[in-house]
Image (tube, rainbow, N blue to C red):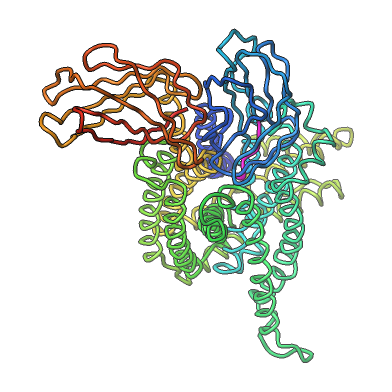
Amino acid sequence: MTQTIAPRAAATTNGGVAFRVRVLLLLLLAVIGAVLAGAAPASAHAALTGSDPQQGAVVSRAPTQVSLTFSEQVAMSDGSVRVLDPKGKRVDTGKATDLGGTTYGVKLHSGLPDGTFTVTYQVVSADSHPVSGAFTFSVGAPSQTSVALSDPAVGGGVVGALYGVGRYVSYAGFILLVGGAAFVLACWQRGAGVRPVQRLVVSGWLALTGATLALLLLRGSYVGSGKVGDIFDLTLLGQVLQTKSGAALVSRLLLLAAGALFIAVLFGAYARRDEADASGKDDGSDKGGVDVDAEKRDLTFGLAIGGAVVAAGLAASWAMAEHASTGIQAGLAMPVDVLHLLAVAVWLGGLSTLLVALFRAPAETQIDTVAVRRFSRLAFGSVTVLAATGIYQSWRQVGSWSALTGTWYGQLLLIKIGLVAVLVGIAWISRRWTAQLSEAPRTKAMATAGAKAGTTAGATAGATALAELRTKQPTKVPANSRDSSSEGSDSRDANSGGSNSAGSNSGNSRRAAQLARQQAAMATARQKRLRDADPARAGLRRSVLAEAGVAVVLLAVTTVLTSTEPGRTEEAAQQATSSSSQRSGPLSLKLPFDTGGQDGKGTAEVTLDPARVGGNEMHVFVERPNGKAFDVPEVKVAFTLAAKKIGPLPVTPDRIATGHWSAIGVQIPMAGDWEIAVTVRTSDIDQTTVTKNAKIG
């Protein structure tokens, strides 16, 4: 019975750990899938805030160039802006120029015909994300056009999906690499010699390196054609290397080379030094003129400094190429973003390492109370830095309460804040378990002895089987581990003679191997029981596992935030679009007036249709305070664009009816914030002028 129960117990033990790991992985995949399914193919982080000619404008003469104004600086190349005539033929020179600030232009050929023209653009915003769009304007009068107005596909498709996965993997690798190494150096130096911890940190390095190489290859196609075949285009790769994003990815690869050296020292010389100290081989005395403790302190200090430099450099490769590098206060935002990323890595990466140490570390190298408490203090400091830098980043990227609640970026930020609050609550529970955690010397001694006994038993059984194969002699299996069937088999083997010696030896070898596996499984189960003997330690493992589950979701939301248009920019784009749509429709202004004479009060309502650059139809309605038509002798209107020193442009409307004045063909030469002045005369000597500003065009 013992031989059949022990393997099942071990299988249950291993299966429980594997089940928890699988649950975490499935949770991560589910969150990523849900986010990717609900996300747009491309996130435009630079919004088009204006153009000349304006979207939908009708101009009397063909312009010599088309200019585009964005909410932030963008990167352009030849062909980034294209202007197509009604038949779909390009009428631009192809070379975009920087007109200053965030405005860019492209020259047009002369002699353009009347009709509707289409402007398409595909650029890269300063935070490395592709932006595309299209709009129309007309010369003379609108006409039919053969050009579709759908936005060019950019940042989507298979290449866009692969690029998104690469971003997730790179952030996860950074967290495991930096957080795992920080946990070992600052909290649990013995962990440098624990294989599961080593595998975790090395996996982080491999994930970050592989994802960085993939992003470098995908970058050209991601911001360009979006074709899978362009991934290995060396010409595109050369162009990417000349951009800010390409330089950041190459810098990250160079820093990862230094990180490989750091890992080699940490898990090589440093781990051997710590193992020697733990085994008592080094007593801290001077040996051969060398202070062993001082040598270890120097090595720890050197690794800490070198690792901090590499980690800060890796974080800067994101800060210098994405959100923090553009917008307001970029000089302050980039170092703040570096601190934010490092705090996230130390907290979540250390949490992952603690989870591995609690579940996968051998019983004889179980993490102690001191290390857990050190990490608790380190995590608290990381959360403090995370909160301070997060508040600043939130203000910088959102800017208003309306953007916080009315934009996708703001809503994701609220979700992230909620997840952080949940994570801090679970961490508080973990701190309570840490306070209750006890490391009784007797328990640790029993754990070590049990682990050694189990290992010895497994090794003895394996050695017995190997010796049997070499000597071809029957193995004496202990009586308490043999069943009746095995005894019968031995009797038959003994009576079978020399002709059956080969079969007998083969059967004995199988039984010896089976016994070795059973002993090893029993040793594993014994280690698990000893690890679970302390209820405080078991409670800590459960709370840390819950923290890790929430951290996985938090990581997914944070990664989506980095690829989502900031709330401040999105709100500016919405306002620009709203203003444009309002300008393309009739403009109506009400201006109260008082000429000062008897019966001199009233309201003048000016309407301009369609209120855009070019010809417009204007109506002026003059009413008394009671709402009835006011028959006044004269009404005049003037338009002034002070920003461009244009005007006043006088307009004298014709009297249509009592209180109704009209003018056809009112020309507005340029879009802008115009001052509209209305002069109303109510008698031979009583008149007044009232003004109001409005955006036209």
Q: Is residue 144 visible?
A: yes
Stretch in magenta: 122-127
Counting from the top left corner in percent of width and height, residue 520 is at 64, 50
Q: Residue furthest top?
A: 144
**On screen, residue 190 above or below 244:** below
Q: Residue furthest right?
A: 499
Q: Is residue 336 shown left or right of residue 405?
A: right
Counting from the top left corner in percent of width and height, residue 471 is at 86, 50
- At a point 55% along the width and 12% down the height, the residue shown is 142
Q: Is residue 123 magenta?
A: yes
- At a point 36% along the width and 36% down the height, the residue shown is 693
Counting from the top left corner in percent of width and height, residue 35 is at 51, 32
- At a point 70% along the width and 66% down the height, the residue shown is 266
**On screen, residue 431 above or below 620:** below
Quadrant of the frame with the N terminus: top right
Tag count = 0
SS assignment for the magenta stretch, majority: strand
Q: Is residue 1 visible?
A: no
Counting from the top left corner in percent of width and height, residue 627 is at 14, 21
Please tell me in which quadrant of the rendered image residue 277 appears: bottom right
The front one of 590 and 487 is 590
The front one of 606 and 422 is 606
Q: Is residue 166 shown left or right of residue 627?
A: right
The front one of 54 and 564 is 54
Q: Is residue 205 magenta?
A: no
